[in-house]
Amino acid sequence: MQKLKQTQIFGYAVGDLGVNLNFQMMGFYLAYFYTDVFGISPAHVAGLILAARIWDAFNDPIMGYIADHTQSRWGRFRPYLLFSAIPLNLILVICFMTPDLSPTLKIVYAYVTYIAHGMLFTTIQIPYSSLSAVMTQDPQERAVISSYRMFMAVVVGLSVVAIGVRPFVDLFETEQQGFFAAAIVLGIFSTGLLWASFFNAKERIQAPAEKYRVKDMFPILIKNRELMVLAVAMLTNTSVWVVGNTVALYYFKYVIQDTSLQPIFFMVMIPFNVLGVFLTPFLTKRIGKRKVFMLGSLVLAIFSIGRYFVPDPNIVFFFTLSIICTISQMMCAITQWGMLPDTVEYGEWKSGHRSEGIPFAFFSFMQKAGMALAASFAAMVLSWTGYEANTELVPLAEQGIRWLFNIFPGIFSLLCLISLLFYRLDGDFHKQIVTELESKKSTC
């Protein structure tokens, strides 16, 4: 198969910027918005996040099945980028509205809108991610695609949200007005970028129409051992950055006591995210994706936990350790998504059914599970330690925020490293599987 052009890879990758303008807005600010702006308790926020992810346990596999069986003139996965972009970003705006409701109705409103967002996000994320498996079967090209994606998602998308939203919100008289306006602006750009990806991405691997039935979904998953292992790594690695991002604004507001430092912090991290993007393909070409993922997890664990012991107010040392964590986290983010398409061929080799939608749906669910467990865990720690919004914190609550920003990400990263010890699908093994599958098809 002809190698992908750089323009094709870039055209696909801009879609992840569109996805992440929406995704990062929710991840960075929704917990804070619920507690400090909308007036919902941390305990209710924790319950809301868990309930939404329980529903995703059913919703995500269904979407994977639907995507696999979609037939259209645009392919199996591309149509969802076109038709789901506007609904997804409309619900983003609705999530950041503050209607004048009773305390009970506020909770109901949050449940309905947050779960609706999760469902619509699934209709974009699973088809978009599945596209990477039908663009190429070359492992190194998949690593490059993942690098481009993460550049758009993290370097550009996260930077825009982490650096730009807080100063933008501060331009308005109230946080209610500011967050609502920010959601509108990000939603418009997100929609345009998803449409751009629709017009530029191509499904080059024409897999036969999927014939498996709903009852085959569980066997397809359970036989894919490498997907199971990688999904555990995804869950724990997702927990690393979700816990940190969830409490980042709390950390700068209540521990460092300077919210203006938050956008500066993330601005400083940008060039080191870029460094991680360029460094990762160089390393994967030489030592493989699995080893790079493990190396990033180990370094991240050491320096994240080490950051906890930085004496106040040594900002330079704090920033230095954070830079090392940032590079390592980027290595992990790129390699996990670069490894996932390889499990499609492994699953076909083991079960006889080729499915992009089901593995990517399961991976999506595990990412959301990691987000849910980490974000709800962070909210519960805030509740258990006596956090009270917009007050001077009791010492235990401040200590809880410190642990959430530093220690717990390190622990989750160590758990990710341990899970990767059981992953085998790297290098020659994957090449052997692809060769056997191609040989089998040529004899049919």
Image: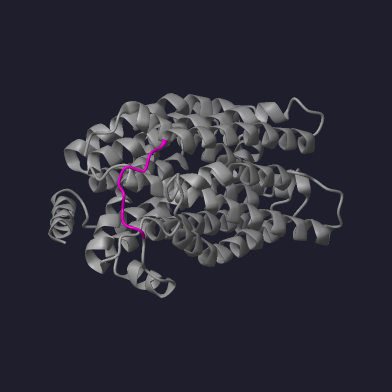
Q: Residue furthest front?
A: 73
- Between 442 and 298, which is closer to the camera in this rendering? 442
Can I make out residue 302 in this image? no
The secondary structure making up most of the magenta span is: loop
Q: Residue at x 72, y 37 (%)?
A: 179
- Between 211 and 47, which is closer to the camera in this rendering? 211
Q: Can residue 207 be found in the magenta stretch?
A: yes
The x, y position of residue 277, in whole percent, is 35, 31
The x, y position of residue 161, in whole percent, is 58, 33
Q: In the shown orientation, is residue 299 left or right of residue 111?
A: left
Rendered image quadrant of residue 353: bottom left
Q: In the shown orientation, is residue 430 left or right of residue 183?
A: left
How many labels sit on residues? 0
Is 220 above or below relative to 342?
below
Is 13 above or below relative to 384?
above
Q: Residue at x 51, y 66 (%)?
A: 57
Can I make out residue 28 in this image? yes
Rendered image quadrant of residue 186: top right
The x, y position of residue 299, in whole percent, is 33, 42
The x, y position of residue 444, in whole percent, is 16, 61
* Colour pattern: one colour
Rendered image quadrant of residue 317: top left
Q: In the shown orientation, is residue 308 left or right of residue 137?
A: right
Is 120 above or below relative to 11?
below
- Between 289 and 416, which is closer to the camera in this rendering? 289
Q: If the image is split into quadrants, where does the N terminus sit?
A: top left
Q: Residue at x 61, y 36 (%)?
A: 252
Q: Can residue 428 be found in the magenta stretch?
A: no
The region drawn magenta spans: 201-209
Q: Residue furthest bottom?
A: 215
